[in-house]
Image (cartoon, rainbow, N blue to C red):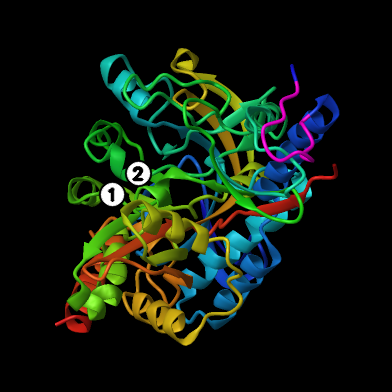
Amino acid sequence: MLGIASGIGGGSPVSSIELHTPLGDEVLSLRAGDHVTLSGIVYTARDEAHLLMMERDIPFDAKGAAIYHCGPIIIDGKVVAAGPTTSARMNNLSGFLLERGVRALIGKGGMGEKVRGQLRGRGVYLAFTGGCAALAASRMKHRGAHYEELGMAEAVWVLEFDKVPLVVGIDSEGNDIFNDVSSKAKLQFESLFK
Amino acid sequence: MQPLVRTGMNAKAIDQVRYNSIVKATSDVIRQAQIFLPADVKSAIYRAMERETSPVAKSELRNILDNLSRAEEMQLPICQDTGVPVIYLTLPPDISYCTELFDAIRDGVRKATKEVPLRPNVVDPISRENTGDNTGTGMPSIHVRPGCQLTITVLPKGAGAENMSRIAMLLPSEKASIPKFITETMLIAGGRPCPPVFLGVGIGGTFDQVASLAKEALLLPVDTMDPYEQELCDTVNKLGIGPMGLGGDTTAVAVKVKRACCHTASLPVAVNVQCWASRRASVVVPL
């Protein structure tokens, strides 16, 4: 599902594209730098959950799913804090999810070249502002859990997103904001301190 | 608990009533730091958002400001990485410098961990076993200075930014390389410390002192920078890393520098990287 809305959380004047899970081919037309809002069911997964899903099975329908790199604090069924964790830790753990139909990976800091390749023609990496735990808590509801034995930070939590503001960091054509920014920063550093 | 008097003739021991006030004040000031960013930090981020010319960076800064309002409304910590508390005390001459003082601070950290709540982040460095209450051997780090009143200042520090901090023992002839070292620290860090950052810089002292100076620089107000600090900040911002490494004008909101004299053959420099959530709070303990 896809629509255009003006204004995202915080009354930003930037127009953003509304996305809803399950995601389909609409993600292929997104470009790095686009502002989106995401609504619908999203599954959290960090290092341990990725390893367990590889070993056993993906405990949800992966087709069109969105994975959120997050170790939330959930108390009495309420999302207390749910900011993103560093996605690069999942650089070597994400291929199987995308092969099974996952369309979006969400987190902070971007991902490596390998994931950039795996996203080609399939899906996108969406960046959520690091540290925004309270903003996340105000826009996410707890809807269930898988692999709870992994503990609070590592379990696969089922969260319902309500227009969570995100930026397309890597698109399905291989454009990658993080990579561009860090290459430019290196050049800039060299020219500043010749 | 037996009260102990170890300092001057007129020093007050920390009796149960004072002990309890210190526990409560510590817990309260941690809660304050976790939920409300200081006004100078908030307004510096706001001004950066207004100046920012990259639309992506601007919207990241809006998310940050939105997050700050939500944390205040919902009375929740600003970030899920509630960090480890670094504590600065000023001790008046009439309060004794004793074990109970430190015990009370540690109890305050335990109370805050349960009640704010804080994420238990403190582990044994080798076994990685979590102590569960944010205290442990040498933790929290407590720095004591003389003062007129008993004040407790907390600086909760998350790992993402702390891990990007660096120290260099430059040569006296390398004074001109200080900006390069600071900028290089940010180049290496990239988007990992959750920029826009605040950089605390220590210059001078000794190896151990310069790291303390860099951290203490993060306690300074960020609404003004002297010309040297401003120049460092402008240079770092030329990297264009931007909020969260997504590019933009705002890589660092402010750079603050603290100096100490040093050995004629030394030039220690340290950079303590702080994420956008530059949390700190201070309280005077009523005694």
Neighbour tally class for label 2: few under 14, some 14-19, many 20 plus, Cα within 10 Å: many
The residue nearer to you, when weighing A48 against A98, is A48
Asked whether A146 falls inside the magenta stretch, the response is no
Q: Are marks 2 and 1 in contact (CB under 8 Å)?
A: yes
* Badge 2 and badge 1 both on one subunit: yes
Q: Magenta residues? A: B3-14
Please tell me whether the stretch drawn in magenta is mainly helix, strand or loop: loop
Q: Which residue is identified by label 2?
A: A87
Q: Is residue A88 visible?
A: yes
- Residue in the picture at 77% in, 31% down: B13
> Does residue B260 lie above or below B144 as drawn?
below
The residue nearer to you, when weighing B15 against B21, is B15
Badge 2 marks a residue whose secondary structure is helix
Badge 1 marks a residue whose secondary structure is loop
The x, y position of residue B257, in whole percent, is 45, 71
The x, y position of residue B234, in whole percent, is 40, 82
The x, y position of residue B202, in whole percent, is 40, 64
Residue type at tag 1? Met
Residue type at tag 2? Ser
Quarter placement of the C terminus of chain B: top right
> Does residue B36 lie above or below B196 as drawn?
above
Neighbour tally class for label 1: few under 14, some 14-19, many 20 plus, Cα within 10 Å: many
Chain identity of mark 1 = A
Tell me the tag on residue A111: 1
The reply, left or right, for residue A30 in relation to residue B263 is right
